[in-house]
Image: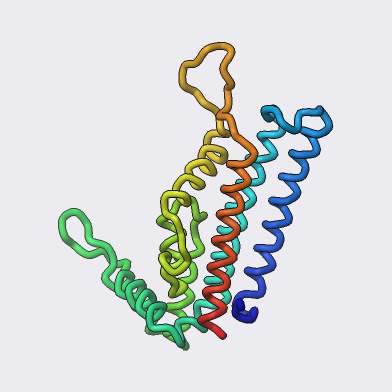
């Protein structure tokens, strides 16, 4: 039995639902196009593969968005009750206070500025958490390392979530090829070869399902902690 939905996860679950609906739309539309051209068992054409590319990109965007929403909505409650979340928050504060070390060994003023900002705040702990949330949600999650960092910040362990790091790495590799390279192969090739990497229906659906199922398990893990 799954843990009950909590206020800290309601928005994340809504995002997951949207992502699942988008994934289904692109998959169904791809199958409809194949049916229209009577090619349900043949190779996918360029338009159909583009639908699968969009399906995977939307699924990864869903994971990115729901993780950031979980951080915004639940990190304060988790920090108050979970020692592993508290430990990650302490590490963040320590890094910020120490600041940066320049090549000649001198400390920059960054640490002092951070400490001053915290000390003059009416609620120092809340200010630290606010800065922590900014750091965790400031960039797009484009790599397994960023996903694992967010999972750890939520007090979860990747082993408990049964996350296959290699599979996650492969999904992000494909996602980044689509986002940053338009999935185009620029290496020398014969004039008859495809200009884009070839994508298969079953493989792309499996990758999208993997990402969305990971998002669902993370949400459930947070709900168990907050219940």
Q: Is residue 34 above or below residue 155?
A: above
Total marks shown come to 0
User: Left or right: 102 with respect to 180?
Assistant: left
Instruction: List x then y, in percent, for residue 143.
Output: 45, 51
In which quadrant is the N terminus drawn? bottom right
Q: Nearer the viewer, residue 143 or 167?
A: 167
Q: Is residue 222 above or below residue 170?
A: below
Instruction: List x then y, in percent, for residue 158.
Output: 42, 65
User: Left or right: 125 with respect to 15?
Assistant: left
Q: Nearer the viewer, residue 91 or 145?
A: 145
User: Left or right: 75 with respect to 117?
Assistant: right
Instruction: List x then y, in percent, for residue 35.
Output: 81, 34
Can residue 112 be spotted in the picture?
Answer: no
Could you say which quadrant of the image residue 17 lies in? bottom right
In the image, what residue occupies the spot 58% across and 52% down? Answer: 60
- Residue farthest toward the left in the current orientation of the protein: 104
Could you say which quadrant of the image residue 19 lies in? bottom right
In which quadrant is the C terminus drawn? bottom right
Instruction: List x then y, in percent, for residue 116.
Output: 35, 78
């Amino acid at each position: 039995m799954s843990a009950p939905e909590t206020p800290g996860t309601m928005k994340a679950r809504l995002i997951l639902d949207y992502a699942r609906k988008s994934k289904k739309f692109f998959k169904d539309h791809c199958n409809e196009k194949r049916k229209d051209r009577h090619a349900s068992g043949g190779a996918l054409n360029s338009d159909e593969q583009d639908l699968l590319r969009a399906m995977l990109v939307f699924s990864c965007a869903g994971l990115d968005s729901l993780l950031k929403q979980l951080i915004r909505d639940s990190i304060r409650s988790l920090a108050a009750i979970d020692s592993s979340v508290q430990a990650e928050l302490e590490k963040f504060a320590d890094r910020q206070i120490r600041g940066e070390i320049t090549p000649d060994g001198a400390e920059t003023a960054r640490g002092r500025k951070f400490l001053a900002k915290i000390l003059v705040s009416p609620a120092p702990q809340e200010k630290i958490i606010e800065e922590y949330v900014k750091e965790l949600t400031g960039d797009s999650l484009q790599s397994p390392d960023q996903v694992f960092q967010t999972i750890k910040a939520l007090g979860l362990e990747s082993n408990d979530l049964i996350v296959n790091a290699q599979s996650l790495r492969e999904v992000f590799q494909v996602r980044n090829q689509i986002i940053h390279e338009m999935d185009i192969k620029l290496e020398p090739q014969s004039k008859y070869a495809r200009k884009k990497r070839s994508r298969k229906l079953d493989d792309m659906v499996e990758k999208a399902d993997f990402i969305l199922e990971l998002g669902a398990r993370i949400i459930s893990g947070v709900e168990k902690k907050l219940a």
